[in-house]
Image (cartoon, rainbow, N blue to C red):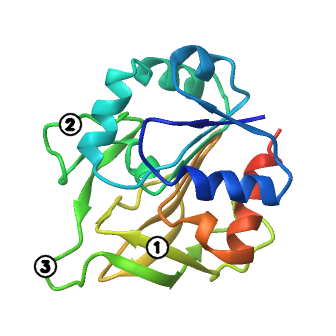
Amino acid sequence: MIAILDYGAGNLRSVQNTLAEIGADYTLVRDAAGLRAAPKIVLPGVGHFGQMMRALDEMQVREALLERIRAGVPFLGICLGLQALFGSSEEAPEAHGLCLYEGTVRRFPADARVPHMGWNQLAARNGSRLLAGLDAHAYVYFAHSYYAPAVAETAATCTYSVAYTAVLESNNTFGVQFHPEKSGPAGLRIVGNFVGLP
């Protein structure tokens, strides 16, 4: 059973449709109790970094989310859900992320057209469980104006004016900057790989 954290925004319906398409059972959770009962967690995200973090705090789920990730529960953050794993974002300097990874989420340089929207190519490192069965340079669909830095846990980068984290993978924690639910067969494979994790 996949628990989709519903914080009042995000692309819930498209994520639900993708899980249904691959035959995965899922439920929406809106509180700490739901997270603590979840065997796998998906945090979808579109919108504003500050609004997301405020919503998580208003729902009083931040600590439960961190508790479950630290306990080894498989977690997948999508788009803003990946950015939330970092400490801060230039989009909302006053907001604190989940602080699981060091670094600041930054806006693309002034000379880049934002948002970065459309298909772009991954540059994957070997051994990613999330990207198993995919070409190392698969195309996926992006829609974002801010990007997470490349870190030791980066499993794939993408380049749009700068190289940045497109896939993050560390033990039970996964994040994708792109939208797998809009990325065709490659996206279905990625979601299926997450669902199939032990």
Q: Residue 72 at what x, y percent from top left?
A: 66, 28
Residue 63 appears in view: yes
Q: Which mark is residue 63?
A: none
Specify whether 63 is left or right of 13. left
Q: Is residue 14 positioned above or below 171 on the image?
A: below
Quarter occupied by residue 9: top left
Q: Residue 89 at what x, y percent from top left?
A: 23, 49
Q: How far, Cα to Cα, is label 3 from label 2?
A: 23 Å
Residue nearest the observer in this picture, 12 or 40: 12
Check disc 2 and report its element: helix, strand or loop.
loop
Q: Residue 87 at what x, y percent from top left?
A: 29, 39
The answer to whether mark 1 and mark 3 are in CB contact below 8 A is no
N-terminal-most mark, 1 or 3: 3
Check disc 1 and report its element: helix, strand or loop.
strand
Q: How far, Cα to Cα, is label 1 from label 3?
A: 18 Å
- Residue name at image x 22 percent, y 84 percent: 112
Looking at the figure, which quarter contains the N terminus? top right
Quarter occupied by residue 144: bottom left
- Residue name at image x 50 percent, y 83 percent: 120
**Amino acid type indicated by mark 3:** Ala
Specify whether 101 is left or right of 20. left
**Amino acid type indicated by mark 2:** Ala
Check disc 3 and report its element: helix, strand or loop.
loop
Q: Residue 43 at what x, y percent from top left?
A: 53, 42
Q: Which mark is residue 95?
A: 2
Q: Which mark is residue 142?
A: 1
Specify whether 30 is left or right of 25. left
- Residue name at image x 67 percent, y 51 percent: 16
Q: Is residue 108 positioned above or below 63 on the image?
A: below
Comparing marks 1 and 3, which lies closer to the viewer?
1
Mark 3, residue position: 110
Number of residues whose C-alpha sits closer than 10 Å to that of mark 3, classed few (under 14), some (14–19) or many (20 or more): few
